[in-house]
Amino acid sequence: MNDSSWQPEPVPAGPAYDAQVGPHTRPMPIVPDAAGRDFDDREARDRGAAPRGGPLFRDETPPQEPMPSPPPPSSQAPQNDSPPPKKRAGRDLRAAIGVGVGLGAVIFASLFIVKAVFVGVIAVAVVVGLWELTSRLQEQKGIKAPLVPLAVGGAAMVIAGYVRGAEGAWVAMALTALAVLVWRMTEPPEDYLKDVTAGVFAAFYVPFLATFVAMLLTADDGPQRVVTFLVLTVVSDTGAYAVGWRFGKHKLAPRISPGKTREGLFGAVAFAMAAGALCMEFLIDGGAWWQGLLLGLAVAVSATLGDLGESMIKRDLGIKDMGTLLPGHGGIMDRLDSLLPTAPVVWLLLAAFVGTG
């Protein structure tokens, strides 16, 4: 059926009705909605337009236009044109430098005045280092490495190395290990193997390696050899820090020491080789500059491995420093980490290059 054929049915007309709407149309009843608007207003609202008549009541809030969606978070972030913050050292550099200068003064004063006093300085450092290591082992792992035989045997080991050389050092090491085994027998057998193993490890790691510093001192140019050992180790650490801090981008061993970089290792090698050439040429009797290059390379590698080794121990223990005795440095063991494994390397190479006399 076409729309044009449809006609509305006639409706009864009356005078009143015709006067309002006319005779041929019948309006739909107006049904207000819940807000008081009629049907036409609701249709306008559904289409997004404003109602024709506006609000029906004064206190009625007119419909609000939808708020625009906020821009992405990246566009809301304030623009910061300031340069990125400069890298900062993780420690108090003033305290570290002050403590380093003080330790250097004590070492050099004892080294060039009376050799025996410097041997005493080594023995004291060994005993303090053993105390720090055994304390951290007990606190973090519950390992009770006996400190008394370690401290007595460690000091005796350093003195024996200075007086009797390598043979005396090995004998003192064996006696110290035996003393650790016997001393631990005075306590219950639980964890005996773990405790004595840690004790023997501590005896080898701290006093035995430190004995090679005392053995360097026995040569005629012993003070110069010790200075060469200390200078090369410190220069290696300084070169690694300076170059790594400025140019370091590629991690060397992120799981062990996240702060170390390959660029820092190259800096350590370059600095140590240059210092080694100068020390062998001007400090060591009969030394040559090319020997210093090899010595510096070996020191850079051994110092880096020593630092990584102690970092591995500290990560296993869950600590940052071995102690707090030295402001800006941590503990004694945090300063001996690169020195201890470097001492036998320097002693061996100097003995091969210029002898032990």
Image: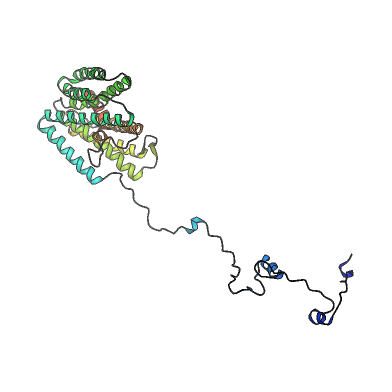
Name which residue lies at 37% across and 55% down: 83
Quadrant in which the N terminus appears: bottom right
Figure colour scheme: rainbow
Judged left or right of residue 284, residue 256 is right
Name which residue lies at 35% across and 44% down: 247
Question: Residue 355: x percent and y percent?
Answer: 19, 23
Q: Quadrant of residue 208?
A: top left
Quadrant in which the C terminus appears: top left
Q: Quadrant of residue 37?
A: bottom right
Please state which of residues 254 and 301 is positioned toward the viewer in this rendering: 254
Depicted 7 relative to depicted 204: above or below: below
Judged left or right of residue 79, residue 102 is left
Question: Residue 106: x percent and y percent?
Answer: 15, 36
Q: Quadrant of residue 170?
A: top left
Question: Residue 271: x percent and y percent?
Answer: 28, 38
Q: Farthest residue in the left direction?
A: 113
Please state which of residues 290 and 231 is positioned toward the viewer in this rendering: 231
Name which residue lies at 20% across and 32% down: 228
Please state which of residues 189 and 285 is positioned toward the viewer in this rendering: 189
Question: Residue 233: x percent and y percent?
Answer: 25, 34
